[in-house]
Structure formats: structure tokens, C-alpha cells
Image (tube, helix red, strand yellow):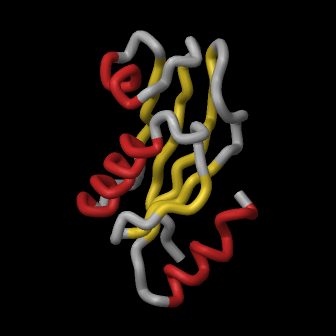
Amino acid sequence: MREILDDIDRWRANGKKVAVARVVKIEGSGPRDPGAAMAVNEDGEVAGSVSGGCVEGAVVSEALAILAESSPGRMVSFGYSDDEAFAVGLTCGGTIRLFIEPLAW
């Protein structure tokens, strides 16, 4: 998470809304360990990674939706058997669970 803090600080200083996605659980094989984080601002700029590139596009879409809806956040998962995850490239054979939430301070 530390690697994304400078970007988050800069975005927030410029008045941008920001959502953060964190890997909370991996079942089987996964590209990143629990705790890996990615931030997305309201313009779609990204800092960090939750999957080494496999599902980042889908995570950006979820984060932008959360910001647009003023949602408190939600759990999402991507796995090999998940058609959407396979379409975006998660082929490691496992399932990753992410919690995506807007930052508020």
C-alpha cells in the first residue's frame, strides 16, 4: 500500500475522488498476495496493482462505478471459472477476492 500513497496524496490534494482496491483473499494460485493494493481516481488514473495486470481493467471499472454511485464499497472476486475474469485474463487457476472502497477523509 505504501507505494500508492504519494499518488493518493497528490490526487486528493487536487480534489479528486479516489477508490482503493485491496486483495483480501486468494484461493489457489494468485498473482498477488493479500494486502496488495491499487488506487483509482475519478479520472481513471491508476496507481499500484492487485493482479499484475490480469484483471486491472475490470477493477478500474468497478472502482469508477463505486465512486459514481457513492457506494460504501463492495467485495468482488475473479477466478478462472468466472467468465468475466477469464475474459480479462485471470488464468492462474485461482480466485482472488478484492474489497474496493472509496477513500474518505
Q: Position of residue 36 (x, y in %)?
A: 67, 45
Q: Position of residue 59 (x, y in %)?
A: 42, 44
Using the image, determine if residue 56 lies above or below residue 69: above
Q: Position of residue 93 (x, y in %)?
A: 56, 12
Quarter of the rendering containing residue 2: bottom right
Residue located at (62% from left, 35% from top): 24
Quarter of the rendering containing residue 1: bottom right
Q: Position of residue 63 (x, y in %)?
A: 38, 53
Residue located at (60% from left, 40% from top): 52
Quarter of the rendering containing residue 8: bottom right
Q: Nearer the viewer, residue 46 or 1?
A: 46
Residue located at (34% from left, 47% from top): 62
Using the image, determine if residue 64 lies above or below residue 23: below
Using the image, determine if residue 101 lies above or below residue 30: below
Residue located at (37% from left, 41% from top): 58
Would residue 25 appear left or right of 73 to someone viewing this image?
right
